[in-house]
Image (spheres, rainbow, N blue to C red):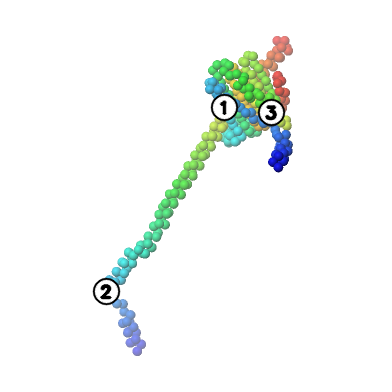
Amino acid sequence: MSENLESKLQDALRPVAPSDEFSRALLKRVTATRHSPAHLERAGRPWPRSAAWWVAAPFAAFVLIAFGVQHHLQAERERALGMQARHQVIEALHVTSQKLDLAYQAVRTQSSAFVEADTGV
Amino acid sequence: MRICRSLMLAVLLLPALACAEPNPQLVLPDFAALSKKAAQSTTISLDSSMLALAGRFLEADDPQDAAAQEVIKGISGIYVRSFAFDTDSAYSQSDIEAVRRQLSAPGWSRLVETRSRKTHADVDIYVMIVNKQAIGLALIASEPRALTIVNIIGSIDLEKLHKLEGQFGVPKLDLETGKAAPRGSQP
């Protein structure tokens, strides 16, 4: 009794090749679905994301490079200004010391003249 | 109401005006005419920020730079106008009258006044002393073919100036520190 039932079940569940008509209908449906606008929309969704990345990355790189260049130029400008200021300080002190020396020479000449007059030279 | 407010403002400002220290910074004229005539002219205007910037670029290893760094420590401004001419008498005393007028103001004392008959070079050195501290220095050097005006603002240590002279290849000046001669006196 049980063997009979088992053989009947095996017969019923035996893999059967689909009919040609069923296969054609299935393939038709699959093809139609793949080319449908909804499917295309879903498939194309990663594109805008990747495009945004390719636009953002060079832009970020450009901003970084521009910032670096600007920083470098600013440092160069400051250095040039600093060197100019240094040169001016040296020059100003040089001029001042030269003129102080002029006064020193005059004072010394005058002092030696006084000494000579005092000693009767 | 407006008068009342003005009076109150005046009362508030009076003590501030009374306590105001004399300004050691001279208003130097443009000297445009002298610049045109001069064979060589030097115009240097360094305020505190420029001096601070210059200080960052002075090298401690270099003796000249180190001396300059030491000198500018207490200084908040250096102003130089220097003109060299090809001919004698290219400028007149009236050109520097505006500067001399400022130096006759209270606060300024003439430290040195030299008149050389040999070189015809006149040098006047003025200092502004407040609370026994020199807060400004002015120098006018008139030579037949050169005119130099120097104005240094800040707490000037004459000892440092001694060092400066030595560093710049100029002999040391035997100034008596803190003993400024009264205005108009002869050395």
The type of residue carrying mark 3 is Met
Drawn side of residue A66 relative to residue B103, left or right: left
Vertical comparison of A44 with B145: above or below: below
Write down the residue under mark 3. Answer: B128
Q: Tell me which corner region of the image, top left, top right, bottom left or bottom right, holds residue B81.
A: top right
Q: Residue at x 66, y 22 (%)?
A: B124
The answer to which quarter of the image holds residue B4 is top right
Q: Position of residue A48 (x, y in %)?
A: 40, 57
Residue that mark 1 sits on: B43
Work out how far the residue at label 1 is from the one at label 3, CA to CA, in angstroms.
Answer: 23 Å
Labels 1 and 2 share a subunit: no
Q: Residue B136: give x, y in percent of width and height.
A: 66, 29
**Structural distance between the alpha carbons of marks 1 and 2:** 103 Å
The crowding category of the residue bearing disc 3, from other C-alpha atoms within 10 Å (few below 14, some 14 to 19, many at least 20), is many
Label 3 element class: strand
Q: Are marks 1 and 3 on the same chain?
A: yes
Q: Would you name the residue on which mark 2 appears?
A: A21
Q: Are marks 2 and 3 on the same chain?
A: no
In the drawing, does residue B71 fall left or right of residue A43?
right
Cβ atoms under marks 1 and 3 closer than 8 Å: no
The amino acid type, in three-letter code, at marker 1 is Thr
For image coordinates 49% across by 39% down, the residue present is A73
